[in-house]
Image: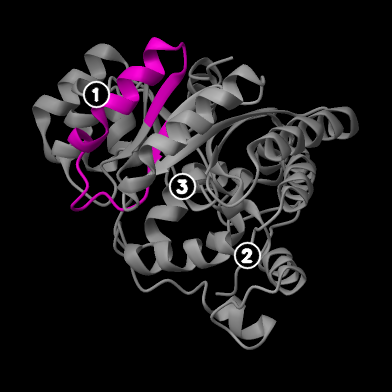
Amino acid sequence: MAARHPEEPTASVGGLTPELDAWIVAMPKVELHVHLEGAQLPETIWTMAQRNGFALPAATLEEWKRFYEFRDFAHFIEVYIAASRAMRTARDFYEMTVAFHEYQASQHIVYTEAFLSASLFVDSIAWDALFEAFAEGCAVGRERHGVEVRFIPDIARNFPQSKRRVLEFTLAGQKAGVFIGLGLGGLEAGYPPELFVDEFAEARANGLHVVAHAGEGAGPESIWGAVELLKAERIGHGIRCLEDPSLVAMLRERQIPIEVCPTSNYRTGVVPKGAPHPILKMIEAGLNVTINSDDPPMFGTSLTEEYRELVRWGLTRGGVTDVAEATQTARFR
């Protein structure tokens, strides 16, 4: 399937009634796990690459779109890094920020906390120019579309040499009023939470919120480390928690929000095609589940589509409301 940016509305989808589908489309939404870079159309990335003289691993736009057919999680990371490398200037990030507000508004998303893959650009673009781009982009997007977006820079686990610079960048951006937290993303396997304890401790000491991708490409031990060592306030993905009943009990007791992104898990092969997604079992277990789109055009989805999937899989309207309210409650501001 070619990557796309889904459009609204649709009259009836799958087993959804038109009335229920219309309710999902129009419902004011909050999103907590989406990447600014991964939320850009392949055409946008291609245009930026051409403008910036960056060679993507494709000779044509159509060939570049075919790269979005991910073989596995590692291949997704490879394509994601290539796309992010095309973003070379503060102008790029300003334009992406404004476009992101427009797209979120089209989904009736009123508030978003979005990740930035800071490890990939922290040493290539002047920080002051970036802070100005994010601030101006958010101001324009808010005025035009009535959407509030807050940013959380990510340390990429597979670029551990960048961790100190990303922390410094995030602290500087906090002072500039554009960042609210520090995140941890990238490849989990081989890059355990222990590598990032000092950075997360300093972030917390300076009043930043802290979140971590965990339990996606690695097992329950990754989630344990994110919670116990990094003191993560939310867990990104977290679906492999079900492999450890004691972890499920801890997450249920503490009600730590889990940022679940179902279509992403299928597209990267974390959940096998045709297998039931763990989200319903997580909800049944009493976990604090939120719903998100991760990298929507890369995965051919949208936040609206993720809610539709919940209904297709058997969640009631009341259950959808509960997930939406849990997502709203889990926001940092």
Q: Is residue 178 visible?
A: yes
User: How does the figure colour the protein chain or chains?
Assistant: one colour
Residue type, mark 1 in image? Val
Disc on the earlier residue, 1 or 3: 3
Label of residue 119 in the image: 3
Secondary structure, mark 1, is: helix
| 112, 83: nearer the viewer | 83
| 135, 9: nearer the viewer | 135
Q: Is residue 281 left or right of residue 247?
A: right
> Residue 244, how many percent across, how many down?
11, 35
| Circle 3 residues within 10 Å: few <14, some 14–19, many ≥20 | many
> Residue 213, how many percent across, how many down?
35, 39
User: How much space separates mark 2 and mark 3, taking CA atoms?
Assistant: 14 Å
Name the residue carrying label 2. Answer: 86
**Residue at the limit of the structure toward the bottom, as seen here:** 59
Name the residue carrying label 1. Answer: 227
The quarter holding residue 298 reads bottom right
| Circle 1 residues within 10 Å: few <14, some 14–19, many ≥20 | many
Asked if disc 2 and disc 3 are in contact, CB closer than 8 Å, the reply is: no
Picture residue at 19% right of the left edge, 21% below the top: 228
Picture residue at 57% right of the left edge, 64% below the top: 83
Quarter placement of the N terminus: bottom right
Magenta residues, as a range?
183-211
